[in-house]
Image: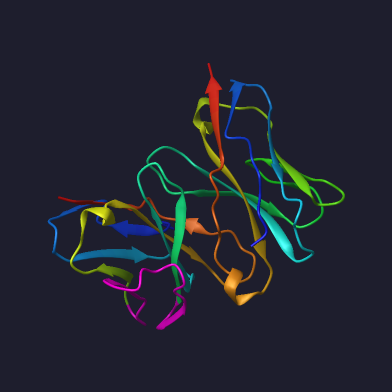
């Protein structure tokens, strides 16, 4: 079991470009969570998805950010028109259900906006 | 969300036990106590969780106070690889808005050789 796979590991974008971050959950996990960690700050929840559904997006910025988890394929976190403040580590986690299982996190995507 | 309080940092000697405390005086009856850790440049890693009884697994032990207002993560024999930020998190059972984990600032554990 390869665990939660995130790619790319590092991503550099110029201001105004789009960033697409991918997350493949563990086999058998249908619940995906995205977190952001700004430099020298803690992990902040962004969005929680199940297959084809957004369950909780209370932590997502209202503009430029979107997430999806299609029936087939990985979950995608999309950031349009990136700005320097978007530079951060973005982590994805998965779990087999919304009951009290531990989350399995990926190694993250480090986005740098230049 | 019920809040947890942890020391900012702790030090331990290699091969000695480590007790990482967490206070959660406003915990509710349906809150589970979760512990995660984050090694440098990595994603968080699940360590252990419990509700009322003490819990053991291959990584650590979790001791929960009888009134549940505090808990302690116990690493029985610290290694250099255990140097990380340790997060104590409360997670409510079955409540839609609390399905996600809320991370605080955690405890930075330094293990001295």
Name which residue lies at 48% across and 49% down: B44
Q: Position of residue B94 (x, y in %)?
A: 67, 74
Main secondary structure of the magenta stretch: loop
Magenta residues, start to end:
A50-72
Q: Position of residue B86 (x, y in %)?
A: 57, 41
The reply, left or right, for residue B45 in relation to residue A78 is right
- Using the image, determine if residue A63 lies above or below residue B64: below
The N terminus of chain B, quarter of image:
bottom right
Q: Position of residue B104 (x, y in %)?
A: 55, 49
Q: Position of residue B23 (x, y in %)?
A: 72, 45
The reply, left or right, for residue B106 in relation to residue A80 is right
Q: Is residue A62 magenta?
A: yes
Name which residue lies at 35% across and 73% down: A62
The reply, left or right, for residue A109 in relation to residue A95 is left
Report the residue that reaches farthest toward the top: B113
- Using the image, determine if residue B10 lies above or below residue A99: above
User: Which of A19/A6 is in front?
Assistant: A19
Q: Is residue B43 magenta?
A: no
How many numbered markers are drawn? 0
């Amino acid at each position: 079991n390869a665990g939660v796979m995130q790619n790319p590991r590092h991503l550099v974008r110029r201001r105004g470009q789009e960033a697409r971050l991918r997350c493949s959950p563990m086999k058998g996990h249908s619940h995906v969570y995205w977190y952001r960690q700004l430099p020298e700050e803690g992990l902040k929840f962004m969005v929680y998805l199940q297959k084809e559904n957004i369950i909780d997006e209370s932590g997502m910025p209202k503009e430029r950010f979107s997430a999806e988890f299609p029936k087939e394929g990985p979950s995608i976190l999309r950031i349009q028109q990136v700005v320097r403040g978007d530079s951060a580590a973005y982590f994805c986690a998965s779990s087999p259900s919304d009951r009290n299982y531990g989350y399995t996190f990926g190694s993250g995507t480090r986005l740098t906006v230049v | 969300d019920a809040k947890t309080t942890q020391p900012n940092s702790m030090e331990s000697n290699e091969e000695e036990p480590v007790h990482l405390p967490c206070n959660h005086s406003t915990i509710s009856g349906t809150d589970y106590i979760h512990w995660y850790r984050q090694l440098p440049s990595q994603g968080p890693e699940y360590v252990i969780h419990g509700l009322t009884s003490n819990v053991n697994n291959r990584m650590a032990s979790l001791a929960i106070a009888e009134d549940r207002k505090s808990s302690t993560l116990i690493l029985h024999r610290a290694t250099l690889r255990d140097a990380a930020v340790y997060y104590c998190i409360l997670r409510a059972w079955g409540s839609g808005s609390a399905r996600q984990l809320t991370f605080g600032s955690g405890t930075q554990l330094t293990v001295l050789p």
